[in-house]
Image (cartoon, grey):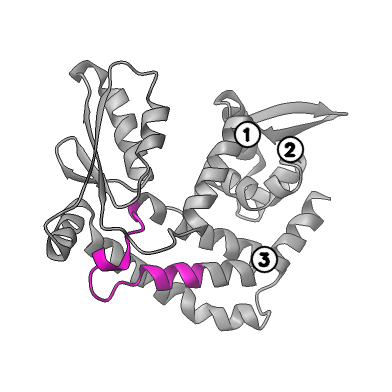
Amino acid sequence: MKPRSLVFDLFGDYLRYRSGAVRLRSLIALMDCFDVPEATVRVVAARMRKEGWLDGRREGRETAYALTGDAWRLLDEGRSRIFTREPGPWDGQWHMVIYSVPEAERALREQLRKRLSWLGFGLLSASTWISPHNRVTQIREEFAEHSAIRIDVLHATSEGAEADRDMAARSWDLVGLNKDYGELLDRYRPRLAAYRAGEVRGREALIERMRLIHDYRLFPFRDPDLPPELLPEGWTGRAAHEVFLQAHGLLRSDAESYVDRLIE
């Protein structure tokens, strides 16, 4: 777990619910649980402040760091993608984004691609992205000020269920994703009994819960949260999500109590 990611995860799962601010010495104590030295914590906090994710202020002789507005929005969106799944049946309609970006705007094109992927769109063919969920408004709004980008949107249905499954298989690496979900299940499902029995407590509960978040939070970048009719046979993603929610909840009390003791 990289120090910068750890700071984001600590704010996202704990500190945001404790005013969204933390004294530097408390952050150092929290990061020490993961064997991150004080000097590294100071450098990471300073960099995140420079990047606009944290605000620094003086509290007596101490420095305290608080989330900026951009950081709050990032954490809110990330939490939504990690913890929630699309409800209800699929209406059978695909939402397509076709873009055109000048060659000179490669950085902007890459930014658009990353955003499309994060919102659950898959690359069907060159410059054509599809999703069973209607999130095209978010893309239009976020890139409205970039005149170099041309975005065309189509809403369409395919020739039938077989064609839908074929499009899904071509747009996302569902086989590789399913394999990784299976490995996550193998890792955490056997631990649920120990979590329920309260065998993981205090510092270890915090470490275990943070490792769980670290292991799971990259899946939303890859998983488009497809409706069941588009998923391959033997899909383990929903089971992995349920195990994640259970483990995260079972470790909550002890992990949060330990965080409270450290930052007080």
In the image, which disc is placed on residue 45? 1
**Which residue position is annotated with label 3?**
252
Q: Is residue 20 left or right of residue 218?
A: right
Label 2: which secondary element: helix
Pointer 3 with pointer 1, Cβ within 8 A: no
Q: Residue furthest right?
A: 60
Q: Position of 211 compared to 87: left or right?
A: right
Q: Secondary structure at mark 1?
A: helix
Q: Residue 76: percent from the left, percent from the top? A: 57, 44
| Position of residue 168 in the picture relative to residue 198 (left or right) | left
For the residues bearing labels 2 and 1, Cβ distance under 8 angstroms: yes
- Left or right, 158 with respect to 88, comes to left
- The disc placed on residue 24 is 2
Residue plotted at (62% across, 28% down): 46
- For the record, the magenta segment spans 222-244
Marks 2 and 1, the one that precedes in the sequence: 2
Please report the residue visible at 34 percent of the width from the left and 56 percent of the height from the top: 223
Quarter of image, res 75: top right
Q: Position of residue 170 (x, y in %)?
A: 16, 54
**CA–CA distance in space, label 3 to label 1:** 25 Å
Residue 250's x, y, as percent? Answer: 63, 72
